[in-house]
Image (cartoon, rainbow, N blue to C red):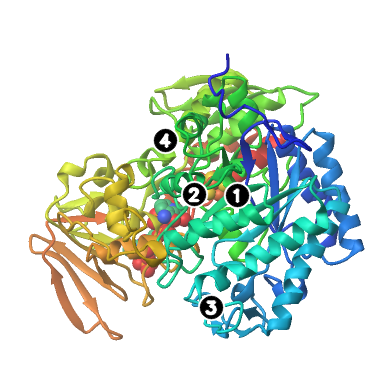
């Protein structure tokens, strides 16, 4: 008997059957657009099909040129496109998988000057203004969706997903925010719904009855002048009547100022929206957003909240997610921690997406942990992200690996990150590596600081040094004052932080520490509190589902400082930085740029401001936390090299500046693949 009977139950549509209830949701990885990347894309999807996904949905392909996301973005408009995609569909079918092509018209989210929308408008997140479509163009676009679906079928796809959420073109027709038309395609709610219902009818008519047609419905817009819940439910019903086989759900427009997928969003935060839609239709409804582990997914299905679950990023993090759940080994799932650092942040910078915790994602043909034919004895020193990735990768390849760690626990800097409100997911990465070390047979030698002499005496063939970083102590007069704390002290012992705190350094850690200081409790752990803080209407009772946020006051006054004369937080992630900045603004953290730190004494932190640093100010802080970057801890490496040992340096011990877990894990994995 499986632990996840609902999750693993097949779903029979008559003409086709999904092997379980787990959908890999659509996500662009930037392998979609260039024809030359098609083999890499096929390997990426085939790996997920092999890992057990019940249905895979591709990134969005436009049904015509005006709908491109970017100039020359992926499209499905010709027989040539369809033939090229056969490489993808046959690779997935060879692994017994099923795959849907997502058809997406970007509307005013197009990043090119020829964009179109329901009415003329400009989105707040793109530089180009969109032109309103003529009625003829609307009709032609409906047909383009249907033609793209036929081509998808010819390409061997098992389904199409019509993208109607996240604020793209169809969503733009649905909401009065963007649909100002007074013809048959606008005005009344019925007219606004005509565009998607006509698309589904046209698609169904052209592909026939024996083909899956999925519609991704915006279950909650989270923007002013979005849809009402009644309009959304009426749409769900009409889409079913028009011939859709299944509804997947999307939450929030891209321009919404409510986070919907970052790590601080509570797990399954929007499940009630799916449950409400499920009550009005007979076709299966798929839940999405911040679902990442099987136990929770199983519970949602068992509770009747949804018929299937959809996850996108969790399949980047672990292509074997379903197989591991089915084998009763959820502890071995490499959980997506919703950091966005290597996936969406890359996509938005037009770079290939991968995954912070799994750098092999979207690099299946390039970064391979192949079994070694020359097993060696290798020591890895340091059990932070770099050392964990390297030691487990080496052991997976068949090397005999011993992992040394001075403390008694694994995780390194992740042990600090997981204590920050909203970063609880980092616990999962520690749990995963803890289980994996045992699974692949890495020997642990913990609670002892390995010396060069000891490692040499042990006779290892190679030693990998991953001894990480330590916080920088800036040369400020008085920095040894009793009120000064390192970020490690501030995070590990929050009770020692005073009522007025100055945070020196506004990088990722300065922001993290400020979030810790301004929150008594983590709002992520309480859905009601989180919704209040971000202004999500409890019962979707307003248009768009948003209300005025209510933010609990910070228990202390916090001043966050940096020397650079630029806005604070500019270096944070593209898709998550705005959330961190918004959190601190809501908590009334004072942000000071262009500061010069003059001294620290009983009165507090003395700084100078202004272009010439001729304005003095004293921040009467009772605690000053140093978040001034890192320095490498690498003396062991130098000693090993001097002793003639084959030594390798990775992670923060190699490069401390801007060190992050993404680079550390990637570097550890790359070394593991080649040693
Ligand atoms: P960081 O991002 O490099 O920031 C260091 C901060 O210290 C900067 O604000 C810098 O600003 C200041 N600083 C540098 N040298 C200084 C000195 N001598 N005296 C005073 N101030 C100094 O490093 P971090 O905050 O330690 O974070 C480490 C890594 O972890 C980052 O790469 C980050 O990506 C990652 N991380 C990310 C997040 C996130 O995205 N939420 C959270 C945690 C960690 P000025 O030079 O302008 O003063
Ligand atoms: Fe998840 Fe972060 Fe990996 Fe993206 S980079 S898939 S958010 S763990």
Q: What residue does disc 4 label?
A: 427
Q: Mark 2 to mark 1: distance in Å?
A: 9 Å
Q: Mark 3 to mark 1: distance in Å?
A: 23 Å
Given the current orientation, which residue lies at the most extreme top position?
A: 1
Relative depth, front residue between 413 and 259: 259
Q: How many marks?
A: 4
Q: Secondary structure at mark 1?
A: strand
Q: Secondary structure at mark 4?
A: helix
Is the residue 596 above or below the residue 535 in the image? below
Of the numbered discs in the image, which one, if any, rests on residue 277?
2
Q: Mark 3 to mark 2: distance in Å?
A: 23 Å
Is the residue 532 above or below the residue 364 in the image? below
Q: What residue does disc 3 label?
A: 179
Q: Position of residue 77 (x, y in %)?
A: 83, 67
Q: Position of residue 213 (x, y in %)?
A: 71, 51
Q: Nearer the viewer, mark 1 or mark 4?
A: 1
Q: What residue does disc 1 label?
A: 247
Q: Residue at x 56, y 42 (%)?
A: 357
Q: Quadrant of residue 1?
A: top right
Q: Position of residue 47 (x, y in %)?
A: 74, 38
Q: Position of residue 136 (x, y in %)?
A: 73, 82
Q: Are marks 2 and 1 in contact (CB under 8 Å)?
A: yes
Q: Residue at x 34, y 60 (%)?
A: 541
Relative depth, front residue between 323 and 625: 323
Of the numbered discs in the image, which one, if any, rests on residue 26?
none
Q: Are marks 3 and 1 in contact (CB under 8 Å)?
A: no
Q: Secondary structure at mark 2?
A: helix
Q: Secondary structure at mark 3?
A: loop
Q: Residue at x 44, y 22 (%)?
A: 446
Q: Residues within 10 Å of mark 4 (few under 14, many from 20)?
A: some
Q: Mark 4 to mark 2: distance in Å?
A: 33 Å
């Amino acid at each position: 008997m499986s632990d996840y009977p609902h999750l693993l139950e097949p779903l029979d549509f008559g003409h086709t059957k999904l092997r379980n209830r787990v959908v890999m949701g659509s996500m662009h990885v930037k392998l979609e657009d260039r024809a030359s990347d098609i083999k890499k894309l096929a390997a990426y999807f085939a790996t997920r099909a092999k890992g057990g996904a019940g249905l895979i949905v591709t990134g969005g392909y436009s049904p015509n040129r005006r709908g491109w996301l970017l100039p020359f973005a992926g499209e499905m408009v010709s027989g040539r496109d369809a033939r090229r995609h056969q490489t993808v569909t046959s690779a997935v079918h060879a692994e017994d998988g099923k795959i849907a092509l997502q058809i997406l018209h970007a509307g005013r989210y197009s990043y090119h000057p020829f964009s179109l929308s329901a009415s003329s408008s400009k989105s707040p997140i793109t530089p180009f203004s969109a032109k309103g479509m003529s009625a003829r163009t609307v009709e032609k676009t409906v047909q383009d969706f249907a033609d793209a679906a036929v081509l998808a079928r010819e390409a061997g796809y098992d389904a199409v997903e019509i993208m109607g959420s996240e604020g793209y073109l169809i969503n733009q027709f649905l909401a009065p925010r963007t649909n100002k038309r007074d013809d048959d395609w606008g005005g009344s709610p019925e007219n606004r719904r005509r565009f998607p219902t006509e698309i589904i009818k046209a698609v169904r008519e052209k592909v026939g009855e024996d083909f899956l047609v999925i519609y991704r419905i915006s279950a909650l817009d989270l923007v002013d002048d979005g849809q009402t819940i009644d309009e959304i439910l009426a749409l769900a019903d009409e889409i079913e009547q028009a011939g859709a086989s299944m509804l997947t759900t999307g939450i929030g427009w891209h321009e919404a100022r409510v986070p919907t997928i970052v790590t601080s969003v509570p797990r399954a935060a929007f499940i009630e929206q799916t449950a409400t839609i499920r009550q009005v239709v007979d076709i299966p409804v798929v839940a999405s957003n911040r679902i990442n582990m099987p136990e929770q997914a199983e519970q949602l299905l068992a509770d009747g909240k949804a018929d299937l679950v959809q996850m996108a990023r969790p399949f980047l993090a672990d292509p074997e997610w379903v197989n591991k759940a089915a084998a009763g080994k959820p502890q071995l799932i490499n959980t997506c921690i919703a950091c966005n650092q290597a996936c969406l942040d890359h996509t938005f910078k037009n770079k290939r997406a991968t995954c912070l915790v799994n750098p092999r994602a979207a690099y299946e043909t390039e970064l391979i942990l192949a079994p070694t034919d020359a097993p060696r004895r290798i020591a890895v020193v340091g059990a932070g992200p770099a050392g964990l990735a390297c030691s487990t990768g080496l052991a997976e390849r068949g090397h005999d690996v011993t992992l040394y760690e001075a403390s008694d626990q694994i995780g390194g800097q992740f042990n600090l990150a997981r204590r920050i409100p909203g970063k609880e997911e980092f616990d999962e990465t520690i749990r995963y590596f803890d289980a994996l070390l045992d699974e692949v047979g890495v020997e642990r030698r913990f609670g002892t600081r390995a010396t060069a002499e000891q490692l040499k005496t042990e006779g290892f063939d190679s030693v990998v040094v991953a001894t990480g970083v330590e916080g920088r102590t800036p040369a400020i007069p008085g920095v040894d004052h009793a009120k000064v704390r390192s970020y490690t002290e501030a995070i590990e012992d929050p009770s020692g932080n005073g009522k007025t705190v100055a945070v020196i350094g506004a990088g990722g850690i300065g922001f993290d520490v400020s979030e810790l200081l301004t929150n008594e409790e983590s709002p992520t752990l309480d859905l009601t509190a989180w919704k209040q803080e971000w202004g999500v209407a409890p019962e979707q009772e307003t248009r768009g589902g948003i209300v005025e946020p209510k933010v609990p006051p910070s228990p202390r006054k916090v001043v966050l400082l940096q020397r650079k004369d630029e806005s604070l937080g500019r270096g944070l992630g593209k898709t998550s930085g705005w959330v961190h900045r918004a959190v601190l603004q809501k908590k009334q953290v004072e942000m000071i740029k262009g500061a010069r730190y003059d001294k620290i004494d009983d009165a507090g932190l003395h700084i100078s401001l202004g272009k010439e640093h001729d304005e003095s100010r004293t921040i009467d802080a009772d605690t000053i936390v140093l978040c001034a970057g890192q320095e490498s801890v690498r003396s062991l490496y130098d000693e090993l090299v001097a002793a003639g040992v084959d030594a390798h340096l990775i992670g923060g011990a190699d490069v401390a500046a801007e060190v992050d877990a993404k680079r550390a894990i990637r570097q550890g994995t790359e070394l593991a693949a080649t040693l």
